[in-house]
Image (tube, rainbow, N blue to C red):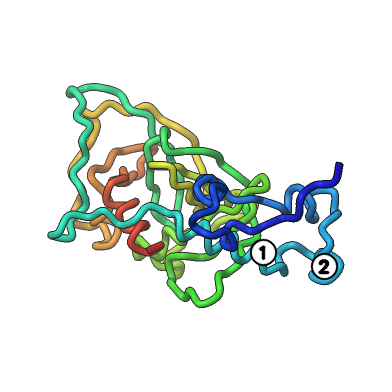
Amino acid sequence: MSQPPYVHPADLPASDPRAASAALSIDDCWNRIGVRGDASCPQLPQHIDCRNCPVQSRAAVDLLDRLPADAAPANGEPAPHLHHHADGEFHSWLLFRLCQEWLALPTVLLEEVAEQRVIHSLPHRRSPIVSGLANIRGTLVVCVSLAALLGIADSHAAPSAAAHQRMLVVRRDGQTTAFGVDEVHGTLRVAETAYKAVPTTFDHGTAHFTHAVMAWNDKTVGLLNEERLFHALDRSLA
C-alpha cells in the first residue's frame, strides 16, 4: 500500500484534528524519504539535499516557534530557583572550558556530548547568540553561542586543539539546545560547602550568570545559574 502524500503541519487548518498532534512533533521527512532515509522523496532530485528543501526550512521555523515563551516576571528578573538543598549536600556538575573560562552546568541538564556538527544559519535571524540549527542524530537542534551570551571574547581564548572541541546538547523544560565548547573535562560531585562567592575579578557578563565558584585543579570554575542562563536563552530565541 502506498503512503499518503506528505502534508506539512503548517499547511493544516486549525480545524483539522491533525493540527493538534502537529504541535507536539516535527515530521522529520528527511529521515524517512530524504537523504537520511530511502531517498524516495519526489522533490529530492530537484533539491539534491534535504538542507536545500523548503520543507526542512519550514520545519526549522516551526521548531523555533514552539520554543517556550519568555515567562519572566514583570520586573524583568528571572524567576527564583525553587530547589533548596541542605548544607553539605553533593551535586553533580559537568565541567567544560569555553575560551579561557572553566564553567560548569548541572549534569542533569545534559542530553549528550557530541562531536562538532555543521551549523546551518537561519535566514532573517542575525542574533549573535543564535548560531543556527544542527542535525544531531536526525533531529534539528537549535545551536547557540554561549560565548556570545556570556560576553567571553574569543581573543582571550586559550589554545585549543580541534580534537578537544565538543558540542554539548542540553535539555530543560522540554527545550533542547546545543552549544560548542573548547574542552570537556567530565562530571564532578561537589558539596555545597565547597561553593564560594563569585569574585569581583570575574568578567561582568560571566558573573551575571554565575551563582558560585569552586576550586578545581588550581583553577576557578564558575557554576552557572541555570535559571538566569535559560531565561536569557529564551529571550534570545523569542
Could you tell me which secondary element the residue under label 1 belongs to? helix
- Check the image and report above or below for 11 versus 23: below
Q: Would you name the residue on which mark 1 appears?
A: 55
Q: Mark 1 and mark 2 in contact? Answer it, CB < 8 Å.
A: no
First of labels 1, 2 by sequence position: 2
Q: Position of residue 6 (x, y in %)?
A: 72, 55
Residue 84, image quadrant? top left
Describe residue 230's horizontal placement relative to residue 66 as left or right.
left
Residue drawn at (61%, 55%) of the image: 161
- Observer-nearest of 157 and 32: 32
Q: Amino acid at mark 1?
A: Val
Question: Callout 2: few (<14), some (14-19), or many (20+) C-alpha neighbours within 10 Å?
Answer: few
Q: Position of residue 86 (x, y in %)?
A: 18, 22
Give the label on residue 48, or none: 2
Outermost residue, front side: 15
- Observer-nearest of 187 and 237: 237
